[in-house]
């Protein structure tokens, strides 16, 4: 709407301005009146803003500079130039405003995930309500093509869900009964009934929107510099312009005051710093938006800027470089079949909710007859003892075998080993291992391509497993068997190895790594879109849960900073040259407006390049052939 009004003023005032060239007005007063009318139609809003700002004490801005320069031109009789300069300025402002709006729309489109309504089930009725009105435990209906309004669990139906608005991934995810639904995603091809697990204020979409809205509050060093620069620069050039208008005529009697006044007015128009003041924040805003499109949520431009100085990247292992899901990888027995061994072990572990127990039952994959299990006894730190079909079954670690004085296999095995004995006799072992994430090796290669000096892993896992993963992925160093406090201590040691300007990044799951995430220069959470702790604890959230996106974030940072530097050098360079030319009387008012508006528009168009995510997308490093290979089979 604002752009339309400005366009109408420009067209109307421009037509009136053109009429002064085609019609010869004999009356000088009528001629001046025509120019004044055209001037106020075109630039009345600029004059009004300048007056309001002066009354508020906010004198030195582009409105003030244009007001003083054009009124000065009227005062010395350059009517055509005064109106023409204001017309050119407003055309530039119109184009500039359109460019900024397009950029903001593009960024808003990336995060257009706020649901407008929720279909709430009330008895036999379905009522369309605001998502804020839905409570935890309520049942909602999500129809085909609708946005999922709140985080929920599917209780009826199955469908494919488009998660691209949150994760940047184009491949839909299948959901069935028991699947988690994340607000902001789109239901593609089925009707789902779901039970709400979080109120709207606590939902994934609400948290992400809040982060994006507040990201601009955390300014980068570049933005802070430009703000301070403009605060002192603008009054400085106004003082120089006054001196330029007054000093030469006073010092030299042969110098005309009018000539130096024109130079001073030209100098004022050239000096406007809006190219920097607008384009620099827009560059960072665009960088944050572009990263969001690729599934990387950066909480502020200060963090986006800092990523470019990354020298050391420190990883947690489980859930970060590995999937954090333990699965049975090997079943070994010389006295019974694999099927018998996994069945006995699953029965013995049936009443335990330990992740290892759950993975054993998942590997068995059949219904368990609870009547066949008796005298179950948990042995903390060792395992479990139970009677299955009347036979004593012991399932646990080597400590359990030692405690029961049972000889067991002692060879080196990569992974968690569950030893099994039946009736006091050793019958075999089962290996359970985490799996390395598909793109973990690519992530390390990409970081080295981005000139990261050192990649390190901190883990509480055993030395053999930790070093094996580090070697497999090509990490520079691995510290194992660490408690959370030990991780902070190791991080302090690593801080001493970076340069003063370099940054240390820690990548973790955002839950048990909170102390290290807080201590690092930049904390990156790999908790995925569903992790509240990850979203709250870190400075950057990888919404797709892919470690390769860390390099993507660094590339986005470097591209943004490159554009920012280009704009600073270009704007200051052009302005510096034209300021000198203006002071010498070589540059006229039209040149001055180009140095202001033209430079601003070019800088803004350059800033909009950061929205092109193609150059910062994941690199095409060849996929690691063993990307889903279990540690035990490496």
Image (spheres, rainbow, N blue to C red):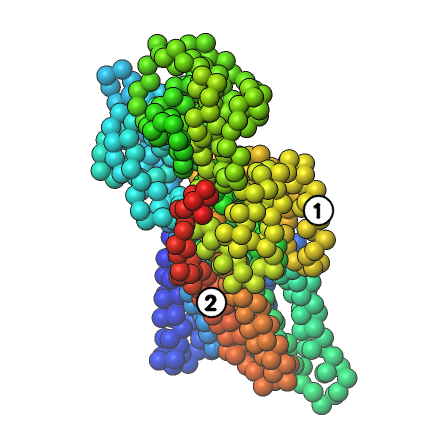
Position of 4 with respect to 501 (left or right) is left
Horizontal and vertical percent position of residue 451: 56, 63
Q: Quadrant of residue 175?
A: top left
Circle 1 Cα neighbour tier, 10 Å, few/some/many (<14 / 14–19 / ≥20): some
Q: Which mark is residue 492?
A: 1
Position of 500 with respect to 326 (left or right) is right
Number of on-image labels? 2
Is residue 133 at least partly visible in the picture?
A: no
Is residue 488 at least partly visible in the picture?
A: yes
**Residue visible at 34% across and 39% down in the picture:** 185
Circle 2 Cα neighbour tier, 10 Å, few/some/many (<14 / 14–19 / ≥20): some
**Residue visible at 45% across and 30% down in the picture:** 429
Q: Earlier in the sequence, mark 1 or mark 2?
A: 1
**Residue visible at 66% across and 43% down in the picture:** 519
Horizontal and vertical percent position of residue 531: 48, 35
Hey, which residue is sitting farthest bottom in the picture? Answer: 254
Q: Quadrant of residue 252?
A: bottom right
Using the image as rendered, state which of residue 506 and residue 210 is in the foreground: 506
Using the image as rendered, state which of residue 407 and residue 626 is in the foreground: 407
Using the image as rendered, state which of residue 451 and residue 30 is in the foreground: 451
**Residue visible at 39% across and 10% down in the picture:** 390
Residue position for label 2: 606
């Amino acid at each position: 709407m604002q752009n339309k009004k400005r366009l109408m003023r420009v067209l109307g005032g421009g037509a009136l301005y053109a009429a002064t060239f085609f019609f010869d007005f004999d009356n000088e007063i009528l001629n001046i009146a025509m120019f004044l009318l055209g001037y106020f139609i075109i630039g009345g809003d600029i004059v009004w803003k300048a007056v309001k700002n002066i009354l508020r004490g906010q004198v030195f801005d582009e409105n003030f500079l244009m007001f003083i320069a054009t009124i000065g031109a009227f005062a010395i009789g350059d009517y055509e130039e005064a109106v023409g300069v204001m017309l050119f300025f407003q055309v530039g402002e119109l184009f500039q405003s359109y460019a900024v709006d397009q950029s903001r729309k593009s960024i808003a489109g990336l995060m257009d995930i706020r649901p407008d309504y929720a279909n709430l089930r009330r008895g036999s009725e379905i009522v369309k309500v605001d998502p804020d009105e839905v409570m935890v435990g309520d049942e909602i209906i999500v129809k085909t093509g609708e946005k999922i309004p709140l985080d929920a669990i599917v209780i009826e139906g199955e469908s494919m869900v488009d998660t691209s608005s949150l994760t940047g991934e184009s491949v839909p995810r299948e959901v069935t009964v028991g699947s988690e639904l994340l607000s902001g995603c789109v239901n593609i091809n089925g009707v789902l009934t779901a039970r709400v697990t979080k109120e709207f204020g606590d939902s994934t979409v609400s948290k992400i929107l809040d982060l994006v809205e507040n990201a601009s509050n955390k300014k980068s060093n570049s933005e802070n510099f430009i703000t301070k620069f403009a605060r002192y620069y603008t009054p400085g050039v106004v003082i120089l312009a006054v001196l330029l208008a007054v000093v030469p005529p006073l010092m030299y009697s042969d110098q005309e005051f009018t000539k130096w006044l024109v130079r001073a007015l030209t100098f004022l128009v050239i000096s406007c710093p809006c190219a920097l003041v607008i384009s620099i924040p827009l560059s960072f805003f665009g960088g944050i938006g572009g990263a969001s499109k690729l599934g990387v949520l950066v909480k502020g431009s200060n963090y986006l800027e800092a990523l470019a100085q990354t020298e050391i990247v420190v990883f947690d292992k489980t859930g970060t470089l590995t999937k954090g899901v333990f699965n049975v990888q090997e079943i070994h027995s010389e006295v019974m079949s694999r099927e018998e061994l996994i069945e006995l072990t699953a029965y013995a572990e049936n009443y335990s909710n330990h992740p290892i127990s759950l993975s054993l039952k998942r590997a068995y994959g059949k219904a368990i007859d609870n009547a066949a299990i008796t005298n179950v006894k948990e042995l903390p730190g060792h395992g479990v003892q139970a009677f299955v079909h009347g036979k004593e079954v012991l399932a646990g670690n080597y400590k359990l075998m030692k405690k029961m004085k049972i000889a067991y296999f002692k060879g080196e095995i990569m992974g968690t080993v569950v030893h099994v004995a039946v009736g006091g006799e050793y019958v075999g072992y089962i290996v359970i291992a985490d799996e390395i994430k598909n793109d973990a090796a690519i992530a390390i290669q990409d970081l080295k391509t981005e000139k990261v000096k050192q990649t390190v892993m901190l883990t509480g896992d055993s030395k053999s497993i930790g070093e094996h993963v580090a070697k497999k992925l090509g990490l520079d160093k691995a510290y194992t068997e660490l408690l959370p406090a030990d991780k902070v201590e190791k991080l302090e040691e690593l801080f001493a190895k970076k340069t003063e300007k370099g940054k240390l990044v820690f990548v973790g799951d955002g839950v048990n790594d909170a102390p290290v995430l807080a201590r690092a220069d930049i904390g990156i959470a790999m908790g995925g879109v569903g992790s509240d702790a990850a979203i709250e604890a870190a400075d950057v959230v990888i919404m797709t849960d892919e470690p390769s996106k860390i390099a993507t974030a660094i590339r986005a940072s470097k591209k943004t900073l490159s554009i920012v530097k280009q704009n600073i050098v270009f704007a200051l360079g052009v302005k510096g040259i034209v300021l000198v030319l203006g002071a010498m009387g070589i540059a006229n008012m039209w040149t001055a407006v180009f140095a202001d508006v033209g430079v601003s528009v070019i800088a803004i168009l350059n800033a909009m390049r950061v929205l092109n995510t193609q150059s910062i997308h994941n690199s095409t490093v060849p996929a690691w052939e063993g990307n889903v290979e279990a540690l035990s089979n490496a």
